[in-house]
Amino acid sequence: ASDSGTAIVDESVETTDGRHVEVAANIGQPAELEPAAERGADGVGLYRTEFLFLDRETPPSEDEQYEAVREALDTFPDGRVVVRTLDIGGDKRIPYLDLPEEENPFLGERGIRRSLDPDSDLFATQLRALLRAGADGAGDLAIMFPLVATVEELDAALDALDAAVADLESREAEAADPEVGVMIETPSAAFMADELAARVDFLSIGTNDLTQYVMAADRENERVGDLHDPTHPGVLRAIHRTVTAAHAEDAWVGMCGEMAGNPDLTELLVGLGLDELSMSAVTIPEVKTAITETEYSSASERGDRARLAATRSEVHTSLEP
Ligand code: PEP
Ligand code: MG
């Protein structure tokens, strides 16, 4: 049993009526891999690679990034490892990269916008490292892009991925053929989820940022903490729209924001149709247990009631047992 008294569930889990839901871990450092496996993670749903860039003086080399991802793939030989490309800017500053000061960093050059900067080779280096790490049957690698707002950005990121494959092939190095996904973290991405999903294998909803941008409420500012709450119906409708769009394009859809790790919301999220939930390792046993206690058909009705509510308090009433 874990500290909380909830038994660790090693196997993959499904609802009482047989709907499988993947439960994965959010990771920032290689040291978090083993504890996540011990807590019963099916794989990694969010590898925040920017943490590999912190607490040092220069960016990690291609080989260092390769080793870090390889370690994740080796820890989960039977599970998927979703690596997010570099997500800097906003609250995530890296002193040695010497990026320009911005007046509104959360509305500035963050996430994929920074990676697509033509004056930087960080993105190309990272993509080569990932493609090498997932090659030679080294496990089930997936790559996803953060803070996408437009189809043009996704197309540019996919072009960069193709270029990295071509680059490796020209050096006779083997490249993986990973699943590719987009994080849904901006209102534009939620509105464009159908077009985005048509171009990739999966979507992963980042509710920390999605809530911040849908509600126009800073994720760091406690004064607007009541607004920065993913159970507002405005956010639930963005989630529902994303799930529906993904499934219509035969893409799977996960969630890797903090919301996914709240066992009180597991039934709601399963009911909204999420295929995967990714969270910090501590909550995995509780969420896995909650999934095994959920009946999908009734959760789905509850999910509809919640998203069709007019207020947050009506949402909460709809979630009561
Ligand atoms: C999110 O925004 O929900 C997310 C998972 O990304 P991060 O918290 O790293 O911004
Ligand atoms: Mg985010």
Image (cartoon, rainbow, N blue to C red):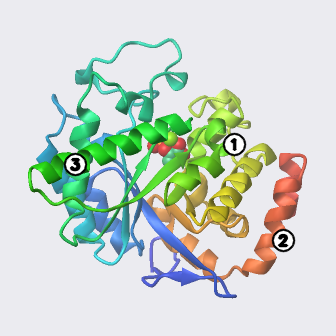
Which quarter shows the N terminus? bottom left
Where is residue 50 shown, x and y percent of the image? 32, 40
The disc at residue 301 is 2
Where is residue 293 shown, x and y percent of the image? 67, 82
Name the residue located 59 percent from the left edge and 34 percent from the top edge: 219
Label 1 sits on residue: 191
Q: Nearer the viewer, mark 2 or mark 1?
A: 1
Q: Nearer the viewer, mark 2 or mark 3?
A: 3
Name the residue located 61 percent from the left edge and 48 percent from the top edge: 195
* Of 180 and 288, the residue lying toward us: 180
For label 3, the crowd category at 10 Å Cα-Cα, with few meaning under 14, some 14 to 19 and many 20 or more, is some
* Amino acid residing under circle 1: Phe
* Amino acid residing under circle 2: Glu
- Above or below — where is 69 with respect to 215? below
Q: Which mark is first along the chain, 1 or 3?
A: 3
Q: Which mark is first along the chain, 3 or 2?
A: 3
Where is residue 176 shown, x and y percent of the image? 26, 61
Label 3 sits on residue: 166
Q: Judging from the image, what secondary structure is the residue with disc 2 in?
A: helix
Judge whether residue 54 can be spotted in this image: no
Name the residue located 72 percent from the left edge and 47 percent from the top edge: 238
For label 2, the crowd category at 10 Å Cα-Cα, with few meaning under 14, some 14 to 19 and many 20 or more, is few
Callout 3 touching callout 1 (CB < 8 Å) = no
**Direction from residue 7 to residue 269 in the image, left or right:** right
* Of 96 and 163, the residue lying toward us: 163
Would you identify the image quadrant in which residue 192 lies?
top right
- Above or below — where is 124 with respect to 23? above
* Of 56 and 69, the residue lying toward us: 69
* Amino acid residing under circle 3: Ala
Q: CA distance from mark 3 to mark 1?
A: 32 Å
Q: CA distance from mark 2 to mark 1?
A: 23 Å
